[in-house]
Image (cartoon, rainbow, N blue to C red):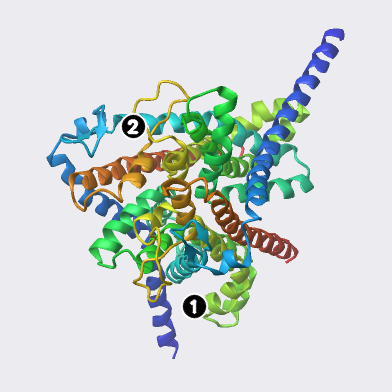
Amino acid sequence: MKISTITGIRKKRIQSFCFFLFRMAAAINGLALAVIIYFMVINGWKAITWTFLTQPPLDSMTRGGILPCIIGTLCLCIGAMAFAFPIGVFSGIYINEYARPGKLLRIIRLGISNLAGVPSVVFGLFGLAFFVTYLEMGVSILAGALTLGAMSLPVIIGSTEEALKSVPDTYREASLALGATKLQTIFRVVVPTAMPGILTGGILGISRAAGETAPIMFTAAVFFSPKLPQSIFDEIMALPYHIYVLATAGTEIETTRPLQYGTSLVLIALVLGMNLTAIILRARLRKKMRQI
Amino acid sequence: MIFSQKYKDRWMKYFFLTVATASVSILVMITLFLFMEGIPIFQKLSVMDFLFGEYWYPTAEPPDFGIFPLIAGSLAVTFLSAMISIPLGVLTAIYLAEIASYQFREIVKPVVELLASLPSVVIGFFGMVIVAPFLQEVFDVATGLNLFNAALMLAFMSVPTICSISEDAIYSVPVSLKEASLALGATSLDTIVRVTIPASISGISTAVILGMSRAIGETMVVLMVAGGAAMMPGSIFDPVRPLPASIAAEMAEAPYRGDHYYALFAIGIVLFAFTFMFNIVADYVSNRYRQVGEATL
């Protein structure tokens, strides 16, 4: 009896120690995020002025702003979504509404999961070899946007699938029972119900495209461009690449440090803002779906 | 009218199917173009010399295209980061799925997701300007841009992957299994260690493999933080040059369709092969050892 109480106490101690470790692990993640954001904000907020956001870089990028980079990143994101959003949504519709379990579905799923695993720099190489060279687009917004689109496709497919899955089958059955065809059911009932979830996927896709550097290094971005892009075949500056260039390749790395922090802060604000929106949107949606 | 609707429905099905195969086609195209642009280098040297050659001097005269130091750099960085990210990711997942109260879970989960969404270039920049000087001072090493720093930064990029997939796996262990264990007098910890984790081990393994796959393919962090020396690492504070860093750093200066260009594409093939392998293994593990119902345990 006594021995068992002693081991009982020991077990309890071990358990509370282990639970403490689990909590610490979770806390470290939060801490890492907080530390990164903290350093970017305290070092970056001074750099952010109206001029910084609305002027092009001056004096071989040691002064001035980042307007061309902001516009470049926006162009790339819009382009990437114009390509990836429809394809991603249609793929999701096929997988969730039409596909039956079997070899074909397994191949498609394997393709998606492998595409999600392709390293970003390999997307860059692919973009260079296929879009830039083979299709003769040159280093351009179009080539970069298509490369980024290919990369964010799995994100959009995944979110679309999840959104469609959360639509109750009773909706589909009710629509079919009223005599609607499958297609009408999908486009008039299922997709509208799942729309907020699908848009969440779109937002996540944009934020992924906005933050990536390696895929646009060889396909769209340049160190410096004196003018704003005029057409989709122009090369451009982009926020992530601008950070990389200023931080590593400039001759005045130390003097441009405030610009680097400022650009990082803008990029973080952009990407985290979009992700936060997506997370909140999704949380609300799940709550609503649970009520149905 | 009815006929045309039927036809429309059928055609749309094929249309959706065609679009759904886009991911597969893109994957095939990636493979195709990597090989098209990478294979020519093997007319100059054998695959063995390329993979196991000890010197990477692509711009020397005559150039050396041995990527063994780069592979070693990549593997070293990946394994060291796994040493950090696996415990961190799996423990966090257990916390989220088994211990955390509802409110805490609603806070921690978005935090992990936001961590995943941080742009890699920002993490690289953070590693360069904040972590590197810190390491240099604390450990009194020659440069803060080294293997350890890169591994640390990569760990925080792969934790979210490991955590979220593990959590799904742990969460989906049937409650009846845990209840049975608790009813037999096991403590919560015993139940987690002896029942919940073994039951979800396939999902956790998948998570770990995918996390490592993310780490080995990550480019900007290793490009900015790993130090960039193409040599075999002797200690964890040596600078290294992993595979993706080489591609990203040298492609701009490699003459179009010269040997260097082909060699960089060949590195892309190696990198692609690594991540492809990781993904296939992950897929196999998650399908083969999946916990189905309660009878198979």
Measured from the top left, where is residue B75 in percent x and y? Answer: 40, 31
Q: Nearer the viewer, residue B153 or A227?
A: A227
Residue lying furthest bottom in this view?
B1
What's the residue type where badge 1 is placed? Answer: Leu
Q: Which mark is residue B230?
A: 2
Measured from the top left, where is residue B155 in percent x and y? Answer: 54, 36
What's the residue type where badge 2 is placed? Answer: Ala
Where is the N terminus of chain A found, in terms of image quarters?
Answer: top right
Q: Nearer the viewer, residue A288 or A65?
A: A65
Q: Nearer the viewer, residue B111 or B57?
A: B57
The chain that hosts pointer 1 is A
The chain that hosts pointer 2 is B
- Considering the numbered disc 1 on the image, is that residue within a helix, a strand or a loop? helix
Q: Identify the residue shown where x is 56% and y is 69%.
A: A54
Total tally of numbered discs in the picture: 2
**Is A219 situated left or right of B112 in this image?**
left
Count neighbours of disc 1 (C-alpha within 10 A) and say few if under 14, some if 14 to 19, many if 20 or more. some
Residue lying furthest front in this view?
A59
Measured from the top left, where is residue B13 in percent x and y? Answer: 41, 72
**Is B128 situated left or right of A222 in this image?**
right
Q: Using the rendered image of the protein, determine whether residue B290 is visible from the camera's viewpoint.
A: no
Return the residue at label 1.
A183
Where is the C terminus of chain A found, in terms of image quarters?
Answer: bottom right
Spatial CA distance of label 1 from label 2 is 57 Å
Question: Which corner quadrant of the image does residue A22 belong to?
Answer: top right
Measured from the top left, where is residue B32 in percent x and y? Answer: 25, 53
Q: Using the rendered image of the protein, determine whether residue B6 is visible from the camera's viewpoint.
A: yes
Q: Is residue B50 above or below residue A164?
A: above
